[in-house]
Every structure is written in C-alpha cells, then in structure tokens.
Amino acid sequence: MEYTGFELALSDYEKGFLTAHFEAHLRFEDYRSNNNAWWESLTDENEWVGVQIGERMFDICIWMQDNDEGPNYPDDLVAVVHECTKTSDGCWQTDTSTSFFLKEAE
C-alpha cells in the first residue's frame, strides 16, 4: 500500500469517533478469538473496516508491521484511515491519496 504523506482532513469529532471505533473493533476481535490470536492473519493480509460518520465514509486499514523478530501484538499493529468516495453506481471506493494514522507500530 502506498502512502502519499498527505494527511486526511478530519474534525476532532471524526478523529475521536474513528479512534473509539478502532479500539472497540480490537476489543471485539480479542473477545471473539478463542486464543486471542485473531491478529495472526494480519501478517498475510490487511483487514478493512468501514465506518460512516454523517455523510462521510471511511475505511480503516489494519495490519501488522513486519519486523525481524516476528509479530508482536499490539506493538506492531498499524491502523490507517482513508476516506471513501461514492462512485457513479453508488458504491464506495477507497481513496488512498490521503491518510490518517490511528496507530503506528511502536
């Protein structure tokens, strides 16, 4: 995934809402997983979570950052928000030209 370095313009409310949604998503996945290792699939692929706030639609992309010692949850977890735009047929499409990091790898 390519990041342009352009930060997605978000209001304080949107930042707070997206952060809370992301944190709730992690707690749900931890709860749902029998061995608390739901994140192991993130070493091979990204997880996308759609969130609508008012008229705006966002995708949160979650993945594990690669490192030499193997994944260390939650330190290596990364979450980036992108805004979605509506296509002519009414579907949402992720626009990765701007982004906002909810969490960076430590």
Image (tube, helix red, strand yellow):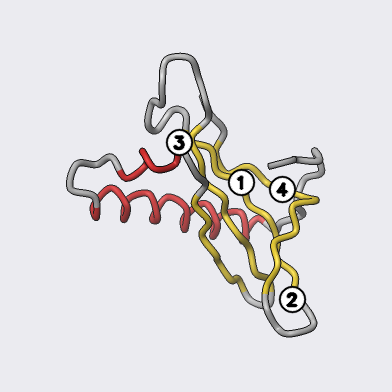
Q: Earlier in the sequence, mark 1 or mark 2?
A: 1
In the image: residue 5, left or right of residue 54:
right
Rounded to the nearest whole Å, what is the CA distance between mark 4 and mark 3?
21 Å
Mark 1 or 3: the one toward you? 3
Crowd band around label 3 with a 10 angstrom C-alpha radius: few (<14), some (14–19), many (20+): some
The tag on residue 86 is 2
In the image: residue 7, left or right of residue 55:
right
Mark 4 or 3: the one toward you? 3
Residue 84 is drawn in which quadrant? bottom right
Q: Earlier in the sequence, mark 4 or mark 3?
A: 3
Crowd band around label 4 with a 10 angstrom C-alpha radius: few (<14), some (14–19), many (20+): many
Residue 48 at x, y percent in the picture: 53, 56
The residue carrying mark 4 is 99
Query: Residue drawn at (55%, 66%), measured in percent from left and top?
Result: 51
Q: Is residue 18 above or below residue 6?
A: below
The tag on residue 43 is 3
Mark 2 or 4: the one toward you? 2
Q: Secondary structure at mark 3?
A: helix
Q: Secondary structure at mark 4?
A: strand
Query: Residue drawn at (63%, 76%), measured in percent from left and top?
Result: 54
* 45 or 26, nearer to the observer: 45
Q: Is residue 80 above or below residue 83?
A: above
Query: Residue drawn at (74%, 40%), measured in percent from left and top?
Result: 2
Crowd band around label 1 with a 10 angstrom C-alpha radius: few (<14), some (14–19), many (20+): many
Give the amino acid at mark 3: Thr
Give the amino acid at mark 1: Val
Q: Secondary structure at mark 2?
A: strand
Circles 1, 4 touching at the beta carbon (< 8 Å) = yes
Rounded to the nearest whole Å, what is the CA distance between mark 3 and mark 2?
30 Å
